[in-house]
Amino acid sequence: MSRTTTLRRIGLSVLLASLLSLLAGPVAASNGAVGLAGASQDNLAVPQWLYLATGGATVGASALLASFVTDRRFIEQVHSWRTSVELDAVVRRGLGVVGSLLGVVLLGLIVYLGFTGPQAPTLNFAVIITFAGLRAGYTMFTYLVGDTWRAVNPWRTVASVLPNGFVGYPRKLGRWPAVAGILALVWVETAAGVTRQPDLLAWAVAGYSLVTILGAVLVGTDEWFDRADPVSVFLRFYGRVAPIRWNDDGLSVRLPGMRLVTDDEVTDLADVAVAVVLVWELTFSGFVTTEQGAAAITAVVEAGLPALVVYGVLYLGGFAAFLGLYVLASRITVRRIETFETPRSLAVRFAPSLLAIAVGYHLAHYFAFFVSLSPMLTGALSSPLSPPANPVVLTLPAWFGGLNVTFVLLGHLLAVWVAHSQAYDTFPSRMQAIRSQFPFVAVMIFYTIVSLWLVALPTASPPFL
């Protein structure tokens, strides 16, 4: 038996053992949408140090396995496979019109019923649709199936019928306005009480609508929604993981996540920051909604610091740390291998793998939340003007906790494959391609340990908010 075959079998054994041990007992999940649901969670049935170490070993083993896949032709076949489904032009236009009308109607109902509907979050159409429907369900649809936001986007629909494009968009800004916007929206969701106060949510959505339409009119719909609008950029990046893509002729189908390998969406550090913020915002919301996170924040506030300052420093400081750690990995890679690539170019090349990690995080945070609230969401959509007196929430079995761990690990395994494929697409030398991945895999292992630790903790409401 060759040495390569032996190492492959050892790596596969480690990977399978890791996955089985992670699924052996119940786990807890954190939930970012604290205004709608709180869940009682069970503690882990295995020691946390073993649980976290096994998660890190799983990603390490996956990188070891990927390093044995050195056939460039095979790698190319995996990420370039595709098939197409043509749709009649009338059908495409009809679907576009239906999507646009649906988006405008939902936006109008969210604002109207946010003001006029019951002011209890579990009864109000605006809160249920925004957080259970859009934040959880539609985002999952975007990366699991395909990105339909361009057709559904109500602000694009409105702005496209108005005169627009009066000034040019400053190219040097890149997508930094979208990064700032995503950070701002998550801050509002966490700290402003919009998940608990429907009228406040309606004001926020109305204000966001005004700013968005004015921005699109000023610089043009394509530039604004492709580069500056945080919601559109948020969904656009998640949509790169989806197997289905809508184009001018119909549907293009590829293996999930394989568009990330040939991704032309990430072109500069602003795009890298978008990928990082998608990972960080879920980590932040996961931390502040755990008992341990709440206790840590309470201790700091009781020491004399204002609560919003504590949250703000944690939020922005954590994002800066996550981004800095990723950029550091690119610098270490350049120092470790002989290459003409710059740290900036490597950071851009490997950033799409972070989107796979973000998908795993999002599923871990929101899948159980979405399933448990699906009866409530169905009722809101079927009868928006008549909220039920007693909303139904599903009680999920304990094994759902294992899914959270599985989602995190699958996201990381996909990220390792994407990084592996990117490395072989970038470097002509086999050893360069393998060694270039190690710093980035180390960052992924760190992200894995943090995320698995968070999903293992019991949840709590964020204090002082």
Image (cartoon, rainbow, N blue to C red):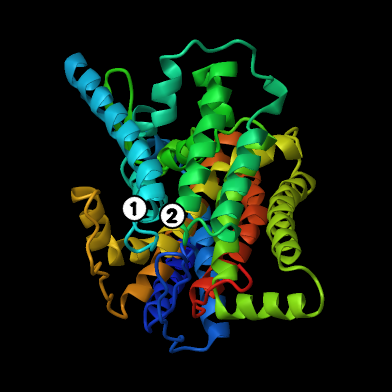
Front disc: 1 or 2: 1
Residue at 42% x, 39% y: name it. 239
Indicate the amino acid at tag 2.
Pro
Looking at the rendered structure, the secondary structure element under dot 1 is loop
Which part of the image, by quadrant, shows the N terminus? bottom left
Residue at 40% x, 76% y: name it. 39
In the figure, residue 450 lies in which quadrant? bottom right
Indicate the amino acid at tag 1.
Gly
Q: Is 298 situated above or below 205? A: below
Q: Is 154 situated above or below 169? A: below
Whether residue 336 is visible to the viewer of this picture, yes or no, is: yes
In the figure, residue 122 lies in which quadrant? bottom left
Residue at 48% x, 59% y: name it. 361
Measure the C-alpha gap from mark 1 to mark 2: 8 Å
Q: Name the residue under label 1.
A: 117
Task: Indicate the position of residue 195 as horizontal and vertical percent values.
Answer: 47, 59
Q: How many numbered marks have been drawn onto this rendered protein structure?
A: 2
Q: Is 391 situated above or below 158? A: below
Task: Indicate the position of residue 368 as horizontal and vertical percent values.
Answer: 34, 66
Depth order, front residue of 279/266: 279
Task: Indicate the position of residue 270 as horizontal and vertical percent values.
Answer: 66, 36
Looking at the rendered structure, the secondary structure element under dot 2 is helix
Query: Sequence order check: which comes first, mark 1 or mark 2?
Result: 1
In the rendered structure, find residue 198 and report the number of the disc placed on it: 2
Q: Residues within 10 Å of mark 2 (few under 14, many from 20)?
A: many
In the rendered structure, find residue 50 and report the number of the disc placed on it: none
Residue at 24% x, 49% y: name it. 385
Q: Is 215 situated above or below 437? A: above
Labels 1 and 2 touching (C-beta < 8 A) = yes
Q: In this view, does 453 lie to the left or right of 236?
A: right
